[in-house]
Amino acid sequence: MYSMINILVLLTLFYVDYTLSKKLFNIHKYGKGAWAHSTEIKIHCFSGDSLIRLANGENKKISYLKSGDEILTIDQSKIVSTEMIMMLDKQISKEVLFYEFITKSGHEISLTEYHLIPIFNSNQNQIYLFAKQIQIGDFLYVLLNDQLKYSPVINITVEIRKGYYAPLTSKGTLLVNDVLASCFAYVKNHHSAQFYMFPFRFYYKLARFFNFTDPFNNPNSEGLHWFIKIMFNFAKYFRPDTLFS
């Protein structure tokens, strides 16, 4: 049963990707329509030296994460566990621009410029901003002495670093160096991105039910996962308003 479902999913995605690619080629070749897009699809996300807090309290280097790892995150102001599903994007040696934030509590986190991170705003609401939008004084969610706290950013630096990793969890968030962050980048709305990740979560749960340890088969591969490329192409054609461009 699992093999048949796997084949059907693959055939469906390849058909969607082929159809979209053909339409995009016609738009480019014949000038049908005014929709424009970049051919480069990128996620980027966290620096390679980031540490991820596991549910057992230990820290694990982001490069060592694997499907099925139990990771801590914060959901509705509660500390909960979530599962690592897959690595959306990974480059070990590619140089990328990072924004590094240091909070008053001493927490540090490095993200690429269009990665989403939540802040606790002046209206006491949680909102997600791109890393490049964060300002001195913005309050980040941090884990301090195993308790949820809000700590203001006191320093921001921008620098080039080598290597990045983009893990996807069931909750769509995770604690990176004990700072809460989204799993998503280059999308305008964190919650919409989490909604559209439902097929990944469903497929992951189904595969785990049948004891398939690595549903997406990408522990050692570099670059953007082919599944994500298809979804980005789909969004660019049908929902370009959801993506940053």
Image: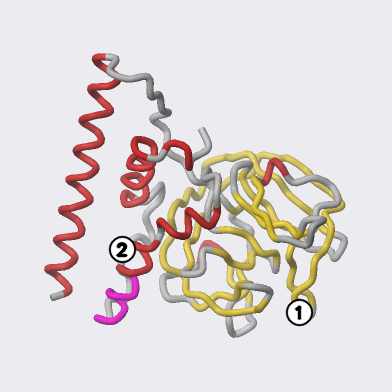
Residue 38: x and y in percent read: 42, 28
Whole-angstrom CA distance, mark 2 to mark 1, is: 35 Å
Q: Residue at x 40, y 56 (%)?
A: 196
Mark 2 vs mark 1: in front = 1
Location of residue 67 by image quarter: bottom left
Please name whichever residue, 198 or 156, is drawn nearer the observer in this view of the structure: 198
Quadrant location of the N terminus in the rendered image: bottom left
Dot 2 lies on which element?
Answer: loop
78 in relation to 163, above or below: below
Magenta span contains residue 238: no
Instruction: Kindly identify which residue carries mark 1.
Output: 147
Q: Residue at x 31, y 63 (%)?
A: 217
Q: Dot 1, crowdedness within 10 Å: few (<14), some or many (≥20)? A: few
**Horizontal side, residue 197 vs residue 64: left or right:** left
Q: Which residues are magenta?
A: 204-210
**Horizontal side, residue 170 vs residue 238: left or right:** right
Mark drawn on residue 217: 2
